[in-house]
Amino acid sequence: MSNPVVARVAADPRAPLRLGVLAPGGYGKTTLLGALSRVLAEVDVSIVDDAHLLPERDLLDLRDRVERGAARVVVAYRPWPRSRALAGLAESLSRAGSVVVLEPWSRDEVRSALAARGLADFVHQQTGGVPRFVRRLAGVTSPEVPGDVLASFRADLDWLDADVQKFLLAAEAGAALRLDLLTSLLGKDSDAVGEVIEAARATGLLAPDGTLLPVARAAVGAVARADRRVAVRQRLAQLVLESGGPVLDLVAPLVDAGVGGPGAVAAFRAAAEEALPTDPALAARLLAACAPSPGLAVRRAAASAMAGDLDTALRLADRVISSGDPELRGPAAEVAAIALAHRGQLARGTELHRWSPTATSTAFGVIGQVGTGRLPSAPLPPAPPTMLDGAASLMAQGVVESVVDSPDTALSTLVGAVGLLEPAGRGVLLPDSPAALAALVALHGGEPGVAESVLDRALRTSLGGALMVVRHRLLRGWVAMVRGDLGAAREVLAGLRRAGRALEPRDWLFAVALEVGVARRDSDLGAVKRTWEQACEAVLRHPVDLFAFLPLGEFAVAAARLRDRHRLAPHLASAALLCKQLGDPPLWAVALHWSGLHAAITAEETAAAEEHAANLAACAPHSRYAATVSAAAESWLDVLAGEVDPDRVEAAAKGLHGAGQWWDAARLAGQAAIRTSDRQAMVRLLDCARSLQGRPPTARPATPTEPTGRLSDREREVAELVVTGLTYKQVGDRLFISAKTVEHHMARMRQRLGCTSRPDLLDHLRRLVGS
């Protein structure tokens, strides 16, 4: 690219010329001198590069020649080292001629130097526009710095003074602007440190703010001797630790370097505490790099659990518990208890919580007691004034209230716990999150909107960290499923499959139940059958507890559909016994009886259905949702008996819809429609079912027949589903009509369209619904 200095000299090569060129290394001084030498090839001129390296005698001679004006002189030099002789020469050049200060290239200049101009922003950000480094990246084809480019910096670094190299290593560690650390690291006073920094600036490796250019930082980390890099970082960490500052950024790169000694252990421990709230996996690795001790084992177990590595957490905690150390046994037991809760072993975890004297563990123990069918015999002690202790106390209080008080009271308490714990975000280890418990209470109480809100907040704030995110997503999918948004529920399951991570038993139980529930609501009996063995295994791996009633109920209906109820019977009996031990609290009992009702209906067991409906009627006075579900249960029994009261059915269905049970509401109205012989009632209830699904009512023609070659709205709906491969039974379940009615629609369409075979009919229908 053209240079205005070269152009000016080329315009009159024989004019007097006394020119200084000042810039750090890599800014293009040598390139400029080469261009000037070609322009001045026919005239007598002295061109001197790297004048800052010349001895004093040569610099004085150059200054004399400049001041006498007897020759053309071009001198290039760096801003450092700046001896008195060089300063004098620069002053003479400025007075007798001019001094050009070279600047980095602009973004446009960088773009013009690249083969892949679309990477100009990346290259400019990496190099700061320093021409030498831009040229090294000129051939890149992706936004990453190749290894050979990083290796090319070795020549820039090897010849540097030892103090400058040490400074660059400190800068690579992030300490370029910490004069207090640099004075101790380099063993110099502030003035001497300033000279080292100026020498580093003169290399061209530093950005204007004094930090390393990104490409230079990567290069220093890649090509510097490992022992020197480790020694600098270790010394910096020691200095920062002594001043009480953060050390994580300094220490993290050393976690796998085999660094040891008391100083390293102290730094690793401090860094682990910093990493724990945001990156518990890194915290666990930092603690693993320390010399093993029981105290560190407890912290490492907690970090491992927060990162989702429950195997390591349980192994470490069990080792400490077995050691018999009375001071560490309690904290280790608390970690193990929390890990076991995620493994579905709530009863065993509750026993372990008794070994820990903390208020948090006491509160978590109460949650476990209630979850396994035992109310606490004494009130909770006052909680210490910390976020975790306060939230844990509210969680326990809310769970107890869900059994002995109103659902609204329990939900309010649990939502309060969510708000109290939100600032802690991912930096807490929990057996269950207040958001998950609030969502469960909300779902059991017919408040899916509240469940959706608290779960969305929990996901935004990463409440409970990596250990809780899957649970929050699964419960969010559950909300979508009961509302009939099967696409959103499927996306939750697809996201878990994409993550490819094995689920802990509690999460796996909900994931399999969600998959079964979506398939059942989609009338996909094949998918229910394919998932059923997993469902049976998930139930075996997760003992029944209060917080697993939702998936258990979903499995109960599926078992009835598959005629395999005997495999689930012991678990349903355990759930009923647990509920009875707690006094049959309406909030939790309603879900069991509602799913039991549907299982009995599916299995055509009228007596069992009537028993569940009676139990729901007993719960009805205790909450609005229980009353709504009870009314729907009575309506279901009437429908099954062939007594369809459209007003009553529509009121019950709309009540369910208002309580968030959108799919169940539409199904009640649809099944009532196909069981009534009253044509007007059937049409009304079908329209009700469609509206509860969020679909417009059916448009009806003025005449009973349709023009040849055209489909009625109902026939089009049937055709759209049949051509996707659904069976007549599946189509009927979707549209709340019988399989026989679907067959009748298909026969009419075949006759009207003049098709001679089923493949011919399907081909016609594909063209019609496609248009």
Image (spheres, rainbow, N blue to C red):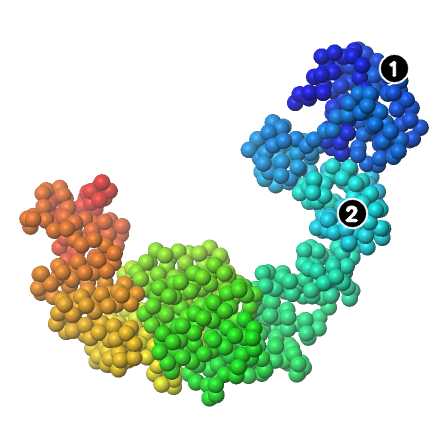
Total number of numbered discs in the rendering: 2
Question: Horizontally, is 575 left or right of 255 in the view?
Answer: left
* Depth order, front residue of 276/553: 276
| Residue 765 position within the rendered picture, expressed as x and y whole percent measured from the top left | 20, 45
Estimate the x, y position of residue 563 in percent, counting from the top left: 28, 72
Q: Quadrant of the N terminus?
A: top right
Residue 317 appearing in the image = yes
- Label 1 vs label 2: CA separation? 43 Å
At 64% from the left and 69% from the top, the residue drawn is 300
Ranked by sequence position, the earlier of labels 1 and 2 is: 1
Q: Residue at x 80, y 14 (%)?
A: 16
- Give the secondary structure at mark 2: helix
Viewer-nearest residue: 708 or 699: 699
Residue found at x 32% / y 58%: 485
Q: Secondary structure at mark 1?
A: loop
Amino acid marked by disc 2: Phe
On the image, the x and y values in percent for residue 68 come to 89, 18
Residue extending furthest right? 57
Q: Residues within 10 Å of mark 1 (few under 14, many from 20)?
A: few
Let me know if residue 562 appears in the view: no
Residue 539, horizontal then vertical, whole percent:
41, 73
Side of 153 relative to 411 (left or right): right
Location of the C terminus by quadrant is top left
Residue under numbered circle 1: 70
Closest to the observer, 646 or 203:
203
Amino acid type, callout 1: Ala
Which quarter of the picture shows residue 555?
Answer: bottom left
Tell whether 34 sits left or right of 720: right
Of circles 1 and 2, which is in front? Answer: 1
**Residue to which mark 2 is pinned:** 167
Q: Work out which residue is located at the far left of the displayed protein and give it.
A: 703
- Residue positioned 77% across, 51% down in the render: 179
